[in-house]
Image (spheres, rainbow, N blue to C red):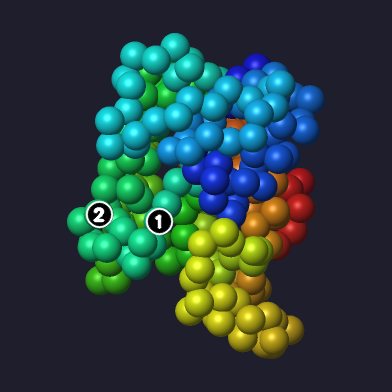
């Protein structure tokens, strides 16, 4: 692979994908559009963008594969409408633009319980995003569904942090799908899926993410 696009590089999982991709000899260049600049790296192209007004004709959209870890929280977004704009609309726009410019594979960091028919707003949004991504036309699409994600976040998420701690204490007693998944492991699966680009639509449940990619 020559060029990989990473959207969501400033987040917990996205940060791990960025580190791994920059160190991976299979990736010649990482294109990572962000709202704020990233530290410079010889393999990194870092356009600073407004995700509400993406430049649709920029040359840097021409990549071979896309990894998307873009997402927010209801608390950060401030409303369900604002949350949906990030976790659904922005993800779909990035996917369409990358596909239009030649990307053949995409790996998307979704969530445990994603279901377009769910009564839970968060799960329904993730499910609708997964559903709509399947209509974009990628030859290879991988939907990664972690449960609680382990790792140090830059932003404060006290309830999520408490849930991770409690789940960690109960880890040996819990079914594998409910265990905390390290962010680094999720990143490994996302990166591998984008690079390998196995044809078709693939779903990686949380229990699979606990193991290194095959």
Q: Which residue is mark 2?
A: 82
- 127 vs 156, nearest the viewer: 156
- SS for tag 2? helix
Residue lying at 59% horizontally and 52% vertically, measured from the top left:
13
Circle 1 residues within 10 Å: few <14, some 14–19, many ≥20: some
The answer to whether residue 102 shows anywhere in this view is no
- What's the distance in space between the residues labelled 1 and 2, CA to CA? 9 Å
Q: Height in image: 18 above or below 55?
A: below
| Image coordinates for residue 93, horizontal then vertical, percent | 32, 33
- Residue 88: mark: none
Residue lying at 64% horizontally and 71% vertically, measured from the top left:
180
- Residue 72: mark: 1
| Quarter residue 42 falls in | top right
Circle 2 residues within 10 Å: few <14, some 14–19, many ≥20: some
| Image coordinates for residue 109, horizontal then vertical, percent | 51, 50
Locate residue 163 relative to residue 185 in the image: left or right. Answer: left
Q: Say if mark 1 contacts mark 2, CB within 8 Å.
A: yes
Residue lying at 36% horizontally and 61% vertically, measured from the top left:
76
Locate residue 126 relative to residue 4 in the image: left or right. Answer: left
* Earlier sequence position, callout 1 versus callout 2: 1
The answer to whether residue 158 shows anywhere in this view is yes
């Amino acid at each position: 692979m020559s060029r990989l696009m990473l959207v969501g590089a400033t987040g917990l999982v996205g940060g791990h994908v960025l580190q791994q991709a920059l160190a991976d000899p299979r990736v010649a260049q990482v294109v990572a559009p962000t709202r704020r600049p990233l530290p410079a790296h010889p393999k990194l192209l870092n356009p600073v963008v407004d995700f509400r007004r993406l430049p649709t004709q920029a040359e840097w959209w021409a990549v071979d594969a896309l990894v998307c870890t873009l997402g927010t929280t209801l608390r950060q977004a401030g409303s369900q409408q604002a949350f949906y704009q990030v976790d659904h609309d922005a993800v779909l726009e990035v996917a369409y633009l990358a596909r239009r410019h030649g990307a053949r594979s995409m790996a998307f960091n979704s969530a445990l319980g994603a279901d377009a028919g769910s009564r839970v707003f968060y799960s329904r949004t993730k499910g609708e995003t997964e559903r709509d991504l399947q209509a974009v036309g990628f030859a290879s699409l991988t939907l990664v569904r972690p449960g609680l994600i382990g790792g140090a976040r830059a932003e404060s998420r006290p309830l999520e942090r408490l849930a991770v701690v409690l789940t960690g204490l109960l880890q040996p007693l819990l079914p594998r799908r409910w265990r905390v998944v390290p962010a680094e492991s999720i990143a490994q699966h996302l990166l591998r899926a984008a690079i390998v680009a196995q044809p078709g639509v693939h779903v990686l449940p949380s229990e699979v993410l606990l193991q290194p990619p095959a």
